[in-house]
Amino acid sequence: MVEENNVENNLTRERKLDHIRAVLERGVESLHTTLLENVRLVHNPLPELDLDDVKLETEFCGRRVETPLMITGMTGGHPDVAKINQELARVAEEYGLIMGVGSQRAGIEDPNLIYTYKVAREAAPNAFLVANIGAPQLSKSYGLREALEAINMIEADAIAIHLNPAQEAYQKEGDPYYRNVITRIVELADGLDTPVIIKETGTGLSYETIRELYNLGVKCFDVAGLGGTNWVKVEVIRSALRGEKPLPAGPLADYWGNPTAIAVVEARYAAPGAYIVGSGGVRNGLDVGKVLALGADIAGIALPALKVLLRNGYEGLREYIDNILYQVKTILYLTGSRTPWDLWRTPITITGKLKEELTMRGIDLERYISLVRLEPLRVRSWSHTVTLQKP
């Protein structure tokens, strides 16, 4: 049994490097778009405020954060990637970003790898950090003990449970086990004092999933929609890089999933009082502004931050984050918005395929705008919802 565990731990470690290699050497983004191109924020030529009046501070999972931007969980679990988590955490600390680490399965199962995650807290003593475990592990054996291990490993402010059924189906040594996961999620949410975030990994959350979990008490979601990194494609590429015959993904590697723009709207429609991260193909400040205007609290980025860091170093990453945050600040200014939440009330247009698909999904856009985006400003916590009237 010990030998079997060692073999599995080694596979988990090597998989981390395979994923980094695939991301850097090959195109891993879906051909299908986020559909954010079908969203337009209406320019306000008379914003009635100064640029310096704009503040990027917002709230997430019951805590005040300096910016509406998150570097979502990517890596950890191999000695060669510890530096990545350290540098991402440094920039999170400097700019007040939220940061997630990658799946902590490797650290939970091999204590020698804990430091590859722990470096994040050491580099970012004040940042909002998010721990990470996988739904398949919950289905198989993980419970409250492993979740607490993951949280304590990085002194996390929240823990993400990532959903990746498509990736597991196309990973040669994958764990496509999701039976009874909802029950296990609810058990964790009830048993932890730390906020639980349900996140997808690039194929998008749906209205039905969010509504069910929201009604069961989950209050935080990261939609991670289609249009960015596609982990089916990553696994196909990974197999090829290893000289193995990939499982037959066909068009699923580019077109399977719920596009980010749809996922954000469905998330807010299904869970009006939840905290929502809009991620999946978010690449610049305009993308951030659009997902916020659609109803997200926070925008999430992953692949571009990783690529910039590995190709241009820490200073290149700083410049990239600087540019995004300045773009977001000017978007707030040019829409007459003082805070990220004010973008919920700014005029937008939704056209084309996004409008058509939302209509097919039963989303009444007029009702969405009037009841979700223009309702009294919500002051929320991860455990309950309090509604206050706008000032």
Image (cartoon, grey):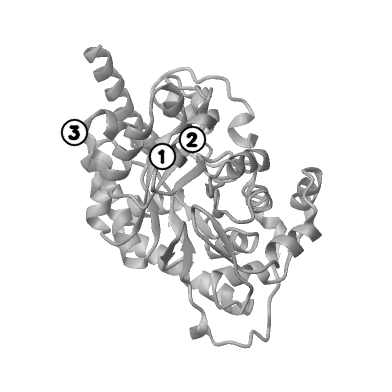
140 over 275 or under it: above or below: above
Residue 380 located left or right of residue 146: right
Task: Report the disc number at residue 191.
Answer: 1
Q: In the picture shown, does residue 156 fall above or below 319?
A: above
- Quadrant location of residue 67? bottom left
Point out the image quarter for the C terminus. Answer: bottom right
- In this rendering, position of residue 17 left or right of residue 42: left
- Give the camera-side residue of 63 and 18: 63
Tag 1: amino acid: Gly
Name the spot of residue 212 as percent of width and height, x first: 63, 39
Residue 269 badge: none
Q: Which of the two discs, 3 and 2, labels the residue nearer the N terminus?
A: 3
For residue 112, the mark is 3
The residue lying at 25 percent from left, 11 percent from top is 1
For the residues labelled 1 and 3, say whether their Cβ atoms are less than 8 Å apart: no
Three-letter residue code for mark 3: Asn
Between disc 3 and disc 2, the foreground one is 2
